[in-house]
Each structure stands twice: as structure tokens, then as C-alpha cells.
Amino acid sequence: MAQAQAVEKKQMRTPIESGCPDGMQYMHPLMIKNFGNWKYHDRPRPGVLHHVAYSGDEIWTVRVGTQRQLGPYEINLLCDIVDKYGEGHVRFTIRSNLEVMVSKWDKVGPLIQAFNDAGYPVGGTGNSVTMISHTQGWLHCDIPGTDASGVVKSLMDELYEEFIKEEMPNRVHITTSCCQINCGGQGDIAINVQHTKPPKINHDLVANVCERPSVVARCPVAAIRPAIVNGKPSLEVDEKKCICCGACYPPCPPMQINDPEHSKLAIWVGGKNSNARSKPMFQKLVAAGLPNNPPRWPEVAAVVKKILYTYKKDARDWERVGDWVERIGWPRFFELTGLPFTKFHIDNWRGARNSLNASTHIRF
Ligand code: SF4
Ligand code: SF4
């Protein structure tokens, strides 16, 4: 019996892991050798990090901006450069910069030249505007209200000089988010989708597609109720209560909320996750109702640049955007940037415990 169990156990299939692979196997050999034993690092020029280990080993990392969504042509081009001028090791940062490690300073110049010749900028380190992070967008998600990488690409084209130089008071993290409720963007400057109309319901599809109780429970302000429409089970929305958040659309696509005209973009300012020099901060809304205007989003770019260059001019060294606003105050922020201040900007969430749906109980 015990023998049969042992044989059975031996033949059990090992699970196929589909998660993130172990990164050590892809690391540059010098990084593996000195893992956890680095003495210090500095930046010899924008876009290049230089790490020195206790063993005396040195490694240079060249950071390259990409267009975020890479096809086979771009990937082959970048890999050819890395094979020819680097040492065959690359990694992506969480903001989709490419980082190439080399063991000799002499290799850094030709590597940068090769990337620049191919149209790829080197930068994004220190006090620069590094690559904008974005949520998945149309390529990977089924609920976006806007393209995400398109906004990033067009904005980074405008902020190219700020990527290759380190001339900001501190690092600037810009984020974009293609719906209002899920992955979300939190950054020094964040560009997030903003729906301005309640969802339109396709009543013919609700009964077949949606689990009505879970849609009712999903609404943060209890604005959705079950209803019978044209003799079929469906849902209805109390439009006076609806805050146009879009939370009902993912579990129930017939509650269509994305709209080319009424899905707008909003800009939030002053968020940061770091606790260097000051506490982490939550961003605040500063501009709303901007048109979602592909392919270059000029209205959004104009507001982002206005905020960015006002910060660059007025902030003290090492102040993040949020630190700068805390010091000068919000009235002065609106004065300096020239953005209109409206009553909609004031929401300190006092009273949210009563007005928001804080439980999963279903209300009818
Ligand atoms: S932010 Fe929203 S729409 Fe965009 S990828 Fe995340 S869940 Fe999807
Ligand atoms: S989930 Fe959001 S968009 Fe949908 S009805 Fe409720 S408040 Fe409106």
C-alpha cells in the first residue's frame, strides 16, 4: 500500500508555473556576483547609473526610453544593439524603460550613440521626467475609456527634452489611467479618465450577460436597482445618485459608459508613494473635463506642460510636486498655473462614510 502511494506520488504532475520567472537567471554576471554587496552608486551623466561593489567591481547601466508597446521589429532592433554594443543583458523598469548593463565605461558612449541613431533617447534618471507609466489600455483590458499608451507616447514626444536632461527640482513621475476605478494612476501628475454621464443600459442583453445582484452590489452609491423592462429582467439607474464612476461596466458590459464625447480626461497633482523627505501623499484633482482627443491629446498636453514648467520654475531643490504645492498652498498653485478653480475641486471626503456604499449588502 505504502509502495503504491509512493509510486503514485512520484508520478504526480508538477504544476506549470505561469507567474513571473526568476529574474536571477537573466541578470548580468557581475550583478549576480555582487548581489546585495554594492557600496555606492552615482550618475556620471543623465541616463547612466554607475554602481560600485565592495569587491571593487563596477557596472554601468544605460537607461533607454521606449515607445512602450514594442512589436517584433522594435524588439529585434533593440536586441541587436544590445548584442553588438552591450553585453547581451537587458531588463525593463516598471515604467517600461529598457536598461542595458555593461562592465566597462568605454562601452557606454558607443551604446548611447547606437540607441540615439536608432531614434531611442537615453535618460530618465535622477531629476528628470522619467517614462510615464500607464495602465493596460485597449491592448490587454476590456474596459478602457481611452487609449493609454497613445497618451503616453504623444506626451513623451513633447517632454523629450525633460527625459534626456536632469533639470527638474526632483524626479517627476507622471501616470495615466484608462478607467476611473481599477488600476488607477497615482503620481506627481496623473491623467485619469473621467466619465461625465451615467451608463446607458442595453436592456436586451442584461439578462443574458449580467449577474444582477453583483452589479447592484458593485455601485458605490447604491444607484442601481433590478427592474423588469419590456418584460425582461434588467436593471435601472437612479441618475440623480449616479456619480459616473464606471464601476458597473466591468461586471455588466451592457451598462455602456464609455463615450467618445462624454468620457473626458482629468488631471490630478501631488501624489507620491515615496517617503523620502516627506510622507507619501495622495493626489488632488486640478483640471477636469478635458477632451479625450486622440491621436495627440493637445489639450491634456498643454495643461500637463503648464503644471510641469510652473513647478520647474517655482519649486525649491528636491521638492516633489506635492511638497511644492504644500509649501505654496493650493490658492497659489491655481494662481501660478492659471488653471480655473471651481467648487468641484473641493472634496475632502468628509461624510463619505454616510454617502458611499461601504458594505456589500444589496439594497433594493
Ligand atoms: S485602468 Fe481600468 S481600463 Fe485601464 S487597464 Fe486598468 S482596469 Fe483596464
Ligand atoms: S456603479 Fe458608478 S456609474 Fe454605475 S450606476 Fe453606480 S455610480 Fe453610476
Image (cartoon, rainbow, N blue to C red):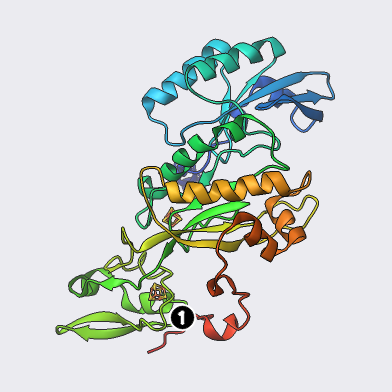
Q: Quadrant of residue 16?
A: top left
Considering depth in this image, is 17 or 290 the residue closer to the camera? 290
Q: How many marks?
A: 1
Q: Say if residue 86 shows up in the picture.
A: no
Please give the name of the residue rendered at 71% of the width and 58% of the height, measured from the top-left corner: 325
Dot 1 corresponds to which residue?
A: 221
Q: Position of residue 50 (x, y in %)?
A: 74, 24
Residue 333 to residue 134: above or below: below
Q: Position of residue 219 (x, y in %)?
A: 42, 76
Residue 286 to residue 355: above or below: above
Label 1 CB sits under 8 Å from any ligand 2 atom: yes
Considering depth in this image, is 251 or 292 the residue closer to the camera? 292
Considering depth in this image, is 296 or 59 the residue closer to the camera? 296
Question: Which element is circle 1 on?
Answer: loop
Residue 266 to residue 90: above or below: below
Q: Quadrant of residue 244?
A: bottom left
Q: Is residue 95 left or right of residue 240?
A: right
Q: Residue furthest bottom?
A: 364
> In which of the image's four quarters is ligand 2 placed?
bottom left
Q: Residue furthest left?
A: 230
Considering depth in this image, is 10 or 55 the residue closer to the camera? 55
Q: Position of residue 23 (x, y in %)?
A: 59, 33
Disc 1 crowd rating (10 Å Cα; few below 14, some 14-19, many 20+) is some
Q: Say if residue 57 shows up in the picture.
A: yes
Please give the name of the residue rendered at 37% of the width and 23% of the height, measured from the top-left corner: 73
